[in-house]
Image: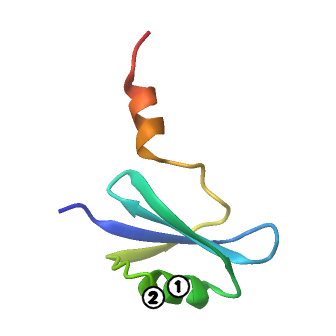
Amino acid sequence: MEKVILQIWNAASDQWAGRILRGDVEDGRVAGCTSKDDVEHQALEAGIEFDRIEMLCSMPPVKDKLALMLQDQTI
């Protein structure tokens, strides 16, 4: 089973946000939170169970299934 990671960062707006990764694929985001604890709380309230939390210095790029599929295609 793929590990689920909650990545949390402080956005430029000074609000806190996070994204959920299942393996290498982004599966959702949490935004507009007042603290890093609020991000974790909102994810848990949404029914997302994660294996670990990672603190990031800045917002990461989107990492969704379509982007990964396009990246793997050759022309």
State the residue position of label 2: 45
Between the residue at mark 2 and the residue at mark 1, the CA separation in whole angstroms equals 5 Å
Report how many numbered discs are placed on residues in the image. 2
User: Which residue is depicted at the point 66% across and 66% down?
Assistant: 57
Please indicate whether residue 71 sits to the left or right of residue 59 in the image.
Answer: left
Viewer-proximal residue, 49 or 36?
Answer: 49
Please indicate whether residue 31 sits to the left or right of residue 20 in the image.
Answer: right
User: Which residue is depicted at the point 39% across and 20% down?
Assistant: 73
- Please state which amino acid type lies under the numbered disc 1: Gln
Give the label on residue 42, or none: 1
Label 1, secondary structure: give it.
helix
Assess whether mark 1 and mark 2 are in contact (beta carbons under 8 angstroms): yes
- Above or below, 53 against 36 in this view is above
- Above or below, 56 against 23 in this view is below
- Above or below, 64 against 41 in this view is above
User: Which residue is depicted at the point 31% across and 76% down?
Assistant: 51
**Quarter of the image that includes the C terminus:** top left
Label 2, secondary structure: give it.
helix
Question: Splitting the image into 4 quarters, where does residue 21 fall?
Answer: bottom left
- Please state which amino acid type lies under the numbered disc 2: Glu
Viewer-proximal residue, 46 or 12?
Answer: 46
Please indicate whether residue 71 sits to the left or right of residue 17 in the image.
Answer: left
